Amino acid sequence: MSSKVLVKSVSGIRGIVGKGLTPVLAATYAAGFGTMLKKGTVVVGRDSRPSGEMIAHAVVSGLVATGLKVIYVGVVPTPTVEIAVKELGAAGGICVTASHNPAPWNALKFFNKRGEFITPKEYEKLDAIVAKGEFAWKPSDKLGKIGSETDWIDKHISRVLKLKTVNRRKIKKAKLTVVVDAVNGAGSFALPPLLEQLGVKVRQINCEGTGNFTHEPEPIAENLGQLSQAVRKHKANLGMACDPDADRLALVDDKGRPIGEELTLTIAVRQVLRKNRGSTVINLSTSRATADVAESLGSKVYYSPVGETNVVQAMRQRKAVIGGEGNGGVIYPASHAGRDALVGAALVLSCLAEEEMTLSELVETLPKYYTIKAKAEPPSDFPARLKSFSTKAASLLGKCKVDRRDGLRFDFEHGWVQIRSSNTEPIFRLIVETDSDQLTRQLSHDVMAHFKA
């Protein structure tokens, strides 16, 4: 894998700091964003990783140099930036965060005036401005101004607490104990105080906000050993883990077992649809369990390509009441149109409290599928192998329906398989989900062999 790699997509501009991503590049893209917006205010925030302050300074410089006013909100979750953009009536926002990527990485996430990820068309326009290198530089008397506001996490928490589907009374009555692992990211300053205001007893690990990731930051089962141990040690009702920018939430049950990041969305969908009628939108990489639960509650389910902006656009088109991505990203428009670990946490706790179940008991009531998510560096002839696999898929999977909107997804009698290029890393991803553990393992091995041979 090249150390100079830069991953560019609707999910942002990502790279390893000092190699793929430099302060010059960050300032350049920020100036491109300022040139595209032309005027107004841009909200800038960041996660806690060590390079964050340096990259944020570069971003602010690029914006100010093109005449835009900046409101710097400090170390905050990505959804906090989204909320601030919308409530301030800003022209846009930038969050300096590489989300689940390891500490050497950083990135720029761009938001439009709705406080949502810029659309693919907006991203193409931004990238074209940067490629052309023609920026709206302003003279010294017309530079933008810099201000700061430090209370946006409090406002974010307040917004979550006011949601009608969040049952504060029941949660408080349940007297829950929750262990939180924020991997020392931005969620350190947001998730514990939210839970405390919900009347939950909070035990904290890795909630110092230092940017020192004590384990791999992606909140998937293999990275939650410390949280699982803490849940058992404190005899907690559950554990909650978020990624460094707190837009994804994973859960550990009362027995100290990671239940899989997919089920965060499944439970949130169950909670919302028990109270509200409407459609659901999930991405093409999301577990069938979520669709099954939504359909059982009378909701029509629609699919979108991976990427928050793609899900949000489809949710708007379908007037969805709930949606998200199976990586633990809950999107609840009643709060705001973006993935949000705080919203996910409040909905999960409300569901547990109202249904008077432990998390392990609740999981037993959900549809059971066996899922393997794998990733690998793509071979040089990856597009050709993808094409050749599509011709042989029927012999491996049987009769199947093919969706080509995001890589290739094959739905067949016992489950589905998806192969796609990542939006956030220089890899390809393989997801296999079926109703049989043995079949999932066998298919995962066989499909991956096709791309590694």
Image (cartoon, helix red, strand yellow):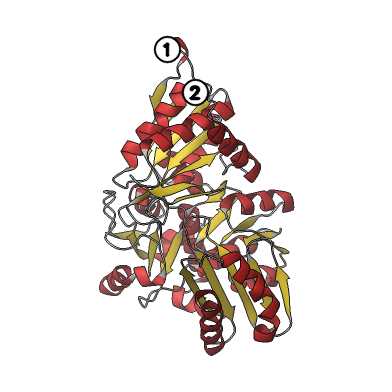
Q: Which residue is mark 2?
A: 68
Residue 65 point in image, percent of width and height: 45, 22
Image quarter for residue 296? Answer: bottom right
Q: Quadrant of residue 271?
A: bottom right
Q: Visible in this render: residue 358?
A: no
Mark pair 1, 2: CA separation: 13 Å
Q: Can residue 54 be spotted in the picture?
A: yes
Amino acid at the residue labelled 1: Ser
**Where is residue 189 shown, x and y percent of the image?**
34, 47
Q: Is residue 146 rendered to the left or right of residue 298?
A: left
For label 2, count other residues whose C-alpha is less than 10 Å away and answer few (under 14), some (14-19) or many (20+): many
Q: Position of residue 96 (x, y in %)?
A: 41, 42
Q: Residue at x 29, y 57 (%)?
A: 213
User: Which of these two is toward me, 90 or 385?
Assistant: 385
Q: Nearer the viewer, mark 1 or mark 2?
A: 1
- 73 with respect to 414 (left or right): left
Nearer to the camera, 331 or 130: 130
Give the SS element for disc 2: loop
**Which residue carries the number 1 mark?**
140
In the displayed structure, 141 sits above or below 390; it is above
Name, please, the residue furthest toward the bottom.
Answer: 438
Q: Position of residue 358 (x, y in %)?
A: 44, 74
Mark 1 neighbour class, 10 Å CA radius: few under 14, some 14 to 19, many 20 or more: few
Q: Mark 2: which amino acid?
A: Leu
Q: Is residue 5 above or below residue 37?
A: below
The relative height of residue 281 versus residue 438 in the rendered view (above or below) is above
Kindly give the residue lying farthest to the front in the view shown.
380
Dot placed on the residue nearer the N-terminal end, 1 or 2: 2
* The N terminus, quarter of image: bottom left
Q: From what the image shows, is residue 54 above or below residue 211?
A: above
